[in-house]
Amino acid sequence: MSLFPIRRSHQPRTPITTLWNPFPDWPAFHDRINQLFGTMDIGELLSPDNVWSPSLDISETDREMIVKVDVPGMEKKDVSVEIDQGDLLIKGERKIEKDESKDKYVHVERSYGTFLRRLPLPDYVDQDNITATCRNGLLELRLQLIPGAKKDVRTVNID
């Protein structure tokens, strides 16, 4: 006699999920959530000003650090660059284009409102020698590096 009965049938077992489904309406619920949040920008949830943040790239050569910021549809008067306690602050505002007499928007995906990007600057950047240009929706910052002032890289032993 065995404590555990041996199953002699060669029929495959039916998975438990087909026997009982605790969330029978999950696909419909998931579709409704996607419909709700698929058409809503996170900026709409945070504030009426549609908070947004432009994308940027940072590269470095032997002599300078280059920061490129995408600011489509903006001019240099709409953007400001500041140094604050060792941080590079890039601020701006993209205003919504409204001409209600001509256009009636059916769908809007572009973000509008103010933005602030705060980038900590390394010690080897010359904070007094920074140039900026804004052309064709691209803000380009060139930060000169202090010669021979690179940060030391130290290895930490792991016990």
Image: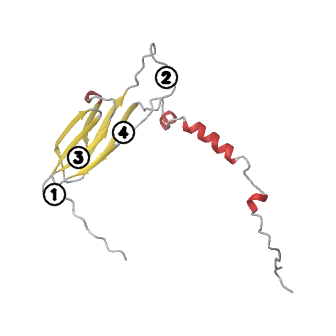
Q: Quadrant of residue 36?
A: top right
Q: Residues within 10 Å of mark 3 (few under 14, many from 20)?
A: some
Residue 149 badge: 1
Q: Residue furthest left?
A: 147
Left or right? Give the position of 125 relative to 138. Answer: left
Whole-percent x, y for residue 136 in the image: 27, 32
The amino acid marked with disc number 3 is Ile
Mark nearer the N terminus (4 vs 2): 4
The amino acid marked with disc number 1 is Ala
Q: CA distance from mark 4 to mark 2?
A: 23 Å
SS type, badge 4: loop
Which residue is tagged 4? 54
For the N terminus, which image quadrant?
A: bottom right
Residue 37 badge: none
105 or 74: nearer the viewer: 105
Looking at the picture, does residue 62 appear above or below residue 114?
below
For the C terminus, which image quadrant?
A: bottom left
